[in-house]
Amino acid sequence: MHVIAVSNRKGGTGKTTVCVNLASELAARGHRVLLIDLDSQGHCAVGLGIAASAEWSTIHHVLATGGNLDDAIRPTPQQNLWLAAADPQFEHGRLGGDAQALRRAMLSAMLGNRFDFVFIDTPPSLDSLLINGLTAADRLLIPFVPHPLSFHGIRQLAKLLFSVISRDNASLKILGFLPVMAAEHVRQHRAMSVQVAREFGAARMLPPIRMDIRLAEAFGAGVPIRAYAPACRSNEDFQSLAGDVVGRLECPAVT
Ligand SMILES: Nc1ncnc2c1ncn2[C@@H]1O[C@H](COP(=O)(O)OP(=O)(O)OP(=O)(O)O)[C@@H](O)[C@H]1O
Ligand SMILES: [Mg+2]
């Protein structure tokens, strides 16, 4: 099982869009995928077209009470894809300084026997939820918009990453940097991607997700892009990304 946190300290950098669509593409390829939404905005459920329901607990309730993660894991309309949804009423600060709550909940639910991938969507705020996400993950995927302000968020996250590695989770590694909303013809976008590659290593660059309004539309419709507009360019990009991630993690083929 691969546990991938999707994070950036800057808001609106495509974290949730990447979680929903990459998780959906991997599930369509036959991998068993769980998406955990640590961001109390609750956008993963929106992107998957899932309404709030008292039948299921939330990941925030599980973390705050030490409850059973299984109570929060619900099926989605897509085969092979499950969601542990967020609690939009969650009061930040309720976790205190406990960095290990998510890791403990995942261990006791023995997710390793049931899922091939776990994606953790994280809030942009520097709080206990983000630290819990990084502590429970073994890989970090960092989507960034190729814009000068992005460097700030990436550098802040890199700092946090090193402190989590030294304090809470020595096995956390960077899976890659992912340019999103990229426009090839904008010189500034190209220059920013080159700069990130120079600072963090060209081998850590993932194939970009281009700017595509269809992604925003699909999100609004509550359907992953592969079902909403299979012929569009961002769906092609998510297919390339899924292939790249599977290759990097050396996942066995699904039969
Ligand atoms: N490649 C893309 N092309 C066009 N629009 C995009 C693309 N990726 C994401 N968006 C849009 O950008 C907005 C922000 O994306 P998203 O919500 O995924 O970011 P986020 O990092 O999760 O935000 P937050 O920090 O608030 O959680 C959304 O409206 C989304 O539909
Ligand atoms: Mg988000």
Image (tube, rainbow, N blue to C red):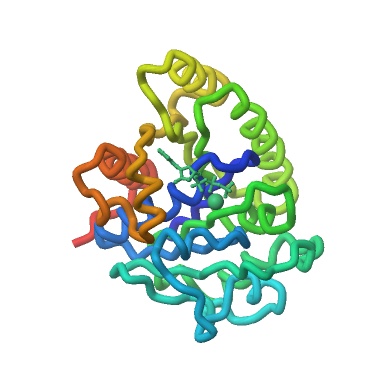
- Picture quadrant of residue 243: top left
Q: In this view, does 125 lie to the left or right of 54?
A: right
Residue depicted at x 59% and y 22%? 148
Choose top left, top right, bottom left or bottom right for residue 93. Answer: bottom right
Depicted 134 relative to depicted 66: above or below:
above
Taking the image as shown, residue 228 lies to the left or right of residue 210, namely left
Percent position (x, y) of residue 211? 38, 33
Q: Which is more toward the observer, 138 or 241?
A: 241
Could you say where residue 19 lies in the image, as x and y percent from the top left?
45, 52
Is 190 above or below relative to 143? above
> Is 81 or 85 nearer to us in this picture?
85
The image shows residue 240 at horizontal and vertical percentages of 28, 39
In the displayed structure image, the side of residue 37 where residue 233 appears, left or right: left
Quadrant position of the C terminus in the picture: bottom left
At horizontal 60% and vertical 58% (from top left) the residue drawn is: 39
Residue shown at 43% from the left, 27% from the top: 203
Left or right, 5 with respect to 19, comes to right
Outermost residue, bottom direction? 55
Q: Quadrant of the N terminus?
A: bottom left
Q: In which quarter of the image is residue 61?
A: bottom right
Percent from the top left, x then y, of residue 181?
Answer: 43, 33
Location of residue 164 with respect to 115 vertically, above or below: above
Q: Which of 135 and 80 is in front in this view?
A: 80
Picture mark count: 0
